[in-house]
Image (cartoon, rainbow, N blue to C red):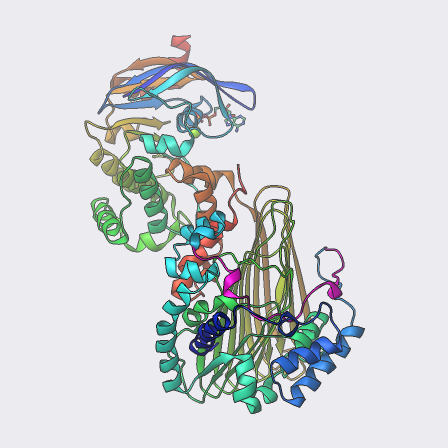
Amino acid sequence: MAASVETVEKVQSLGERYKHGFVTDIEMETAPKGLSEDTVRFISAKKNEPEWLLEWRLKAFRHWLEMPEPQWAKVDFPPIDYQDAYYFAAPKSDDDKPKSLDEVDPKLLETYEKLGIPLREQEMLAGVAVDAVFDSVSVATTFKKKLEEAGVIFCSISEAVQKHPELVQKYLGSVVPAADNKHACLNSAVFTDGSFVYIPKGVRCPMELSTYFRINAENTGQFERTLIIADEGSYVSYLEGCTAPMRDENQLHAAVVELIALDDAEIKYSTVQNWYPGDENGVGGIYNFVTKRGLCAGRNSKISWTQVETGSAITWKYPSCILKGDNSVGEFYSIAITNNMQQADTGTKMIHLGRNTRSRIISKGIAAGRSAQTYRGLVSLGGGAENARNHTQCDSLLIGDRCAAHTVPYIVSKNRSANLEHEATTSRISEDQLFYCRQRGIGEEDAVALVVNGFCREVLQQLPMEFAVEAQKLVGISLEGSVG
Amino acid sequence: MLEIKNLHATVDGTEILKGIDLSIGAGEVHAIMGPNGSGKSTLSYVLSGRDGYEVTEGEVLLKGQNLLDLAPEERAAAGVFLAFQYPVEIPGVPNTTFLKEAVNAVRKSRGESALDAMQFLKVLRAKVKELGMSDEYLKRAVNAGFSGGEKKRNEVLQMAMLEPALAVLDETDSGLDIDALKAVADGVNALRGPERSMLVITHYQRLLDYIVPDRVHVLSQGRIIRSGGPELAKELEAKGYADIIEAAA
Ligand SMILES: Nc1ncnc2c1ncn2[C@@H]1O[C@H](COP(=O)(O)OP(=O)(O)O)[C@@H](O)[C@H]1O
Ligand SMILES: [Mg+2]
């Protein structure tokens, strides 16, 4: 997202508002409650979108009307009342935001503290008005300059629609079609923000797009849409989300992420998801229904998903790879932690189409409290996928005896030359291990965190350094109160 | 240093320790010998505060502090160290990480500042060298895939890092060949000092040739039935447990 541009606008609009004595026209800022074709038109008009995009949204909306909710996931929640929600609201005014960290929920601050997040970033994350914004301008500008020099396009999807319509039109919906599933349909119809990345031929993106993104974490939306294109021979590492717990008044989140890797390109996409999980009884948490899919379109391309899922009341998410190019590689590394009443149904799909395609799945599920989680994974080999290989390893760790973990692997093979390996284990955190740690002076909760971090190590190692450290702390924090 | 008075303990409702009295002075090394099932490991767990080992009577004081009210990690901070008979594997957690967590946790509860990574590694490398271990071993996960000898040596390394006031070594000799036994004994002997008391639990006299104790106690069915100097271990070796136990009855 173009932080500098946004920031400047924000600051300007602030001045504007002072000038006009805070008069804002609510009618113009927020779409009426509920979802209809008018809502979709309103959003598209607000964003000044070209005709083709409006049509695309409307088509998605019409599909959405007819499409049933996905039923196969092992999650349980009351029907969603789509008409009882707002689908477009202008960003919150600074007047509505806390003025300083003193006004922020102390519990939230405590967690920031434990994660070791610097004060400035705490302010950004907690949505504190004004101050932090100025601070981020210079940092953001430096990043932006570096990226521009490399020819990398990194901006909000709305900005990309205006400035790079040919790229957006070519790739939007090319991996996750508008009619893919009910949640993706909804996103296609009403998405309001998200990121756009284009890495030109032969360019290795000069930085993790993580750091940059985090500064903009404030705007993480309800219906995010992300599109990343790595042109031939390019490389990018992108980190989404953040370890700090994020709160949002909107219960339903339905994001779509599409990745496209052309010949010899590589995309590494890492997610740390820590949306509000609800209280101990599961009241008030976020429903996170995400469609993430990458297309290894070119030869020798590679897409790697790494996720650390600790938040949300319900997680429904299957970052997948379509391995179309010959010799392409798909990877999925996942840590899912559920505690209290959380439910997670997550996994991946590896669709092998090209020759010599390889995929690797490592899933680590940790369930505590009364939570339930399912690993659901599909490995599919098409007729043309000569010599395709997959290795899947699913390990579940249970803490306490009121939680549940399930593993549901699906394999569809139309090719006899395939080489598939699947390993699955389920274990309980052992009293021996905890006592051993405690005898050495490590407190019980730290001992749990240590053992669980060890259990997740293979996945944590996949994360960019700076986040690996935070993610380790997050693992401990997510499991607080799970023993004893 | 350590005062155990009339200690009774039950496991799952069965009384295993039936009134133990034992006093170890600062700098002393005492050995507890006894047949299998006599309650040796139970004593080590009761001293270190393991869940499920319930003290029904008696007291345990370390430097005058009542240990029985403390959680296992608090006892560790107070200076209790247990070298396990069966060291536990913790997959995915490198030895260095584990030791750093442990050392800093103990320092913290003693009101000392945490060691940073550099300081810590310096101390650790020095100890590893002293014990004749290789650095490579530090990167491996705690006890995971270690040989019996490596596990026991790792216990001694942890003890060296944590510098306990009371070290309880539960059958640290079991499963070791003679070279490994010597190496472990050398490590333990190097840690003997005026500020440290040790309770060396063993089934066989062999270990006590290398770690020479000040006192030897014979445990049978949850009671200390005889105590004596190092010569008692030799007598046990010569006569066997049955004779000694019968003579004491
Ligand atoms: N967890 C337990 N539950 C029930 N009985 C136990 C348990 N642990 C030990 N015991 C019993 O306590 C007695 C002493 O065991 P232990 O302390 O392990 O002996 P030692 O270490 O001297 O071989 C044995 O009879 C053993 O069966
Ligand atoms: Mg024993």
Q: Is residue A64 visible?
A: yes
Q: Residue furthest right?
A: A66
Judge by depth and name the residue closer to the eye, A339 or A131. A131
Write down the quadrant of residue A64 in the picture.
Answer: bottom right
Q: Which residues are magenta?
A: A77-100
Image position, residue B111 (x, y; %): 29, 36
The residue at 65%/82% (across/down) is: A45
Is B216 displayed left or right of A406 in the figure? left
Image position, residue B191 (x, y; %): 22, 34
Write down the quadrant of residue A44 in the picture.
Answer: bottom right
Image position, residue B101 (x, y; %): 35, 46
Q: Is residue A452 visible?
A: no
Judge by depth and name the residue closer to the eye, B178 or A107. A107
Image position, residue A15 (x, y; %): 45, 72
The residue at 56%/24% (across/down) is: B12
- The chief SS type of the magenta part is loop
Q: Does A246 sit above or below residue A60?
A: above
Judge by depth and name the residue closer to the eye, B187 or A7. A7
Q: Does B113 sit above or below residue A378?
A: above
Quadrant for ligand 2 reads top left
Report if residue A92 lies within the magenta region. Answer: yes
Write down the quadrant of residue A84 in the picture.
Answer: bottom right
